[in-house]
Image (cartoon, rainbow, N blue to C red):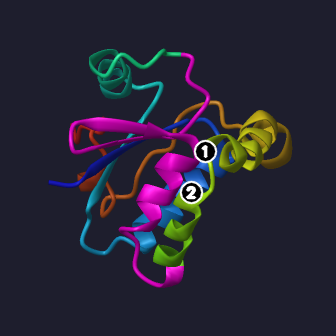
Amino acid sequence: MGGIILFDGVCNFCNSSVQFIMKRDPKAFFKFASLQSETGKSLLLKYQITEDVDSLVLIEDDSYFIKSSAILRICTHLRGLWKILSVFRFVPTPMRNILYDIIAKNRYRWFGKKETCMIPSKEERRRFLDYTDS
């Protein structure tokens, strides 16, 4: 079926990460929605994830994953050598999340923040759950 990635739509690093994933996911396994969108908020509610989650969220096979667990699962579906990173799933989650938490805590300071969520290109629109072509 595929996975859904919820991301911080105003975070420059997060938006760059979405672009990175899309370039390495030519079969469009992943769909996307910003955490700030109605679709994102609805999915957070459905999966009982707090709205103040400070993480990228992956929804796959009717389960959700956050932080490094989400990243490693995403990597297994990407084209290229990114699949190799899945070996880090054997590292205990708290240890893996140390680096993730440092980046998440500093992402606005290091990479900047947008005033509004990104607007996908015409080609990208089919990959975004919360985009309506009106």
Q: Is residue 56 left or right of residue 123?
A: right
Q: Which residue is mark 1?
A: 93
Q: Find residue 60 and report its image quarter.
A: top left
Q: Find residue 67 and report its image quarter.
A: top right
Is residue 36 magenta-colored?
no
Q: Is residue 93 left or right of residue 25?
A: right
**Secondary structure under badge 1?**
helix
The relative height of residue 71 versus residue 62 in the rendered view (above or below) is below
Q: Position of residue 82 (x, y in %)?
A: 51, 76
Image quadrant containing the C terminus = top left
Looking at numbered disc 2 in the image, what kind of residue is underneath it? Ser
Q: Position of residue 28 (x, y in %)?
A: 26, 65
Please give the range of residues in magenta. Answer: 52-81
- Which residue does the image show at 60% across and 44% down from the upper left? 93
Q: Which residue is mark 2?
A: 17
**Secondary structure under badge 2?**
helix
Q: Position of residue 107 (x, y in %)?
A: 76, 41
The relative height of residue 123 versus residue 67 in the rendered view (above or below) is below
- Which residue does the image show at 82% across and 38% down from the upper left? 106
Image quadrant containing the N terminus = bottom left
Among numbered discs 1 and 2, the one appearing first in the sequence:
2
